[in-house]
Amino acid sequence: MLLTTLILGLVLGGTYALLALGLTLQYGIARIMNLAYGELTLIPAFILVALFQASGLSPLLSLVILAPAGYGLGWLLYTVMMRPLVARSGASGRLEVDSILATFGLLFLIQGVLLVVFGANFTSISYLDRGVDILGVSVALNRVIAFGICVVVAAGLIVALARTRWGLVMRAVALTPGSAPLVGIDVNRVARQGFALGTALAAVAGSSVAMYQTFSATGGVVFTMKALVIVIMGGVGNVTGALIAGLALGLVETFVATAIDPGLTLAATFAIFLIVLLWKPQGLFGGR
Amino acid sequence: MLKILLPLLGLAALAFLPNFVSDYGLGLLIGAVTYVTLASAWALFSGHTRYVSLATVAFYGTGAYTVAVLNEAMPYPAVLAVTALIGAAMALVVGLSTLRLAGVYFVIFTFGLSELVRQLITWYEVNVTGTLGRYIFLDVTARGIYWQMLALAALTIGLTAWIHRSRLGLGLRVIGDDETVAAHSGINLARTKLIAFVLSAVVLTLAGAIVSPRWVYVEPSIVFNPTVSFLTVIMALLGGANRLWGPALGAVPLFLAFEWLSSHFPDTYPIFLGLLFIGVVFALPDGVLAGIEKLRAKRKGAAQ
């Protein structure tokens, strides 16, 4: 029983971690607090389902298309919508409020489009819905695949950020956007890349959610909320922290759902958020 | 003198308005005054501090739901008093845990709050009381609701005017400009923010309570409609959230526009809302009133 909860929790946590990685990049590097993040994960999720139902396109194949498409969408969003706000705010603290308000509007815009195009019903597909035996616990294959995607993407991201020159530049902007230009870094370009990469990760996370979970056009808020809580827990811009916090949230949620009541998972998320806020608001792994 | 007399005359005129309109017109009046109240109450806290609260409907819905639970157990004034207390308690919990920190934590907390309250009430109703959905049978006419809401709106705007002149308002303005400066000039940051937030939340909760008899049947998914939070923010922003009359000015035309849109384009109107919202944030970041002033200043500059 405990082992089942543990494994299912880790698998769910993998998706949450992936969800939070994109948001932590957008907020940490591009300094955009993106409240429409959950909606950005729902767009690819719906497209994946539509492609699967219409032409039987394998979700894994869709993923390969959707991730770069997400990057393109993020690039476009940053250039058209966020960049003017960044330019307007200059060095003042205005960007945070402006980005919160603008993405709040974007949230309703995307949600409205999704409702019109795909309707308000819950959607799901049955893809590789057979059990696999892991340490004596039967887990659906699609969940295992989703977890595998998370591990691969997160490991790739951590290595790229820690070991490459590109990662160094990203970290420099995340740390001190004011000083980065002094060493010849084009902050605008890096912020755009960070935002676009975050959206690409949102697309990957949304696609893996669509593989095994039911979702609806109005459910984006909950995704955003969970991702935000994980980002705060892990420390803003801290990729490893987000990964660990995501897995932890998955575990806690699965535990609450099996031991207490599935209707209280969001309450559990909020409870964790409250504890983190009162105890260590800079994040569990933050030293600041 | 004129500054006080004119609004009072306007209030008296508005109080007599139900005599001249149809039932549908009265419904529109109630809606418009409700949103004037919500937007003004939202701006009471968020306008100066720039702490964007996205939880309007968490309080509004809680107010409505409290009336639904208590309307047969207590006399109406007692119900309203309990509602206000619940709203204040909720705001205290949110405020005490987030307002000591940077603004973004507050935004995140309020962002999910209404969804949390909705799910908790649904869970409680399904598992503990075993019924989902309640009826409100109160002996309140539509006119009664209109007058109560009008009084609440007047109270909110009056309260805002008073706060603008008081030490509290000065403190809020300094906090909105620069929190570090505010702290250094001896303003108790957390307490100042907390007081304003609780006041704003009490008004929001009361607004939900007053308007609730209009629904008759109440269910968590009905009263916790996220569009209300959304509309409140855009109305206050459009008029100018840091002006006394800004939220009211934004609320009336936008409410009428939304009524029209939602009846003519029931499926696509959230898209219009989203576009409008983004448009306001980009084109009129400080609201219409500030925009007009800027334009005038420019003209003056060009004329000289």
Image: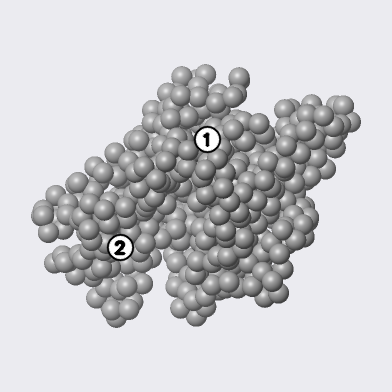
- Above or below, A27 relative to A109: above
- The residue at the point 58 percent across, 71 percent down is A118
Locate residue B149, reporting x and y percent: 28, 59
Name the residue carrying label 1: A248
Location of mark 2 (residue): B219
**Residue type marked 2:** Glu
Left/right of residue A6 with respect to residue B86 in the rendered view: right
Kindly identify the amino acid type of the residue bearing the numbered disc 1. Answer: Ala
**Residue A216 appears in view:** yes
- Whether residue A100 appears in this view of the structure is no
* Residue positioned 60% across, 46% down in the render: A15
Please state the total of marks drawn on the protein image.
2
Q: Where residue A234 sits in the image (x, y, percent)?
A: 58, 31
Q: Label 1 vs label 2: CA separation?
A: 33 Å
Q: Is residue B224 left or right of residue B145?
A: right
Query: Are labels 1 and 2 on one chain?
Result: no
Whether residue B21 sits left or right of residue B289 in the image: it is: left
Q: Locate residue A185, reporting x and y percent.
A: 86, 33
Percent of width and height locating residue A106 = 61, 57
Residue occupying the point 49% across, 76% down: B266
As drawn, the residue found furthest toward the right would be A184
Mark 2 and mark 1 in contact (Cβ < 8 Å)? no
**Which image quadrant is residue B104 in?**
top right
The chain containing the residue under callout 1 comes to A
Towards the viewer: A104 or A170: A170
Residue B54 versus residue A128 in the image, above or below: above
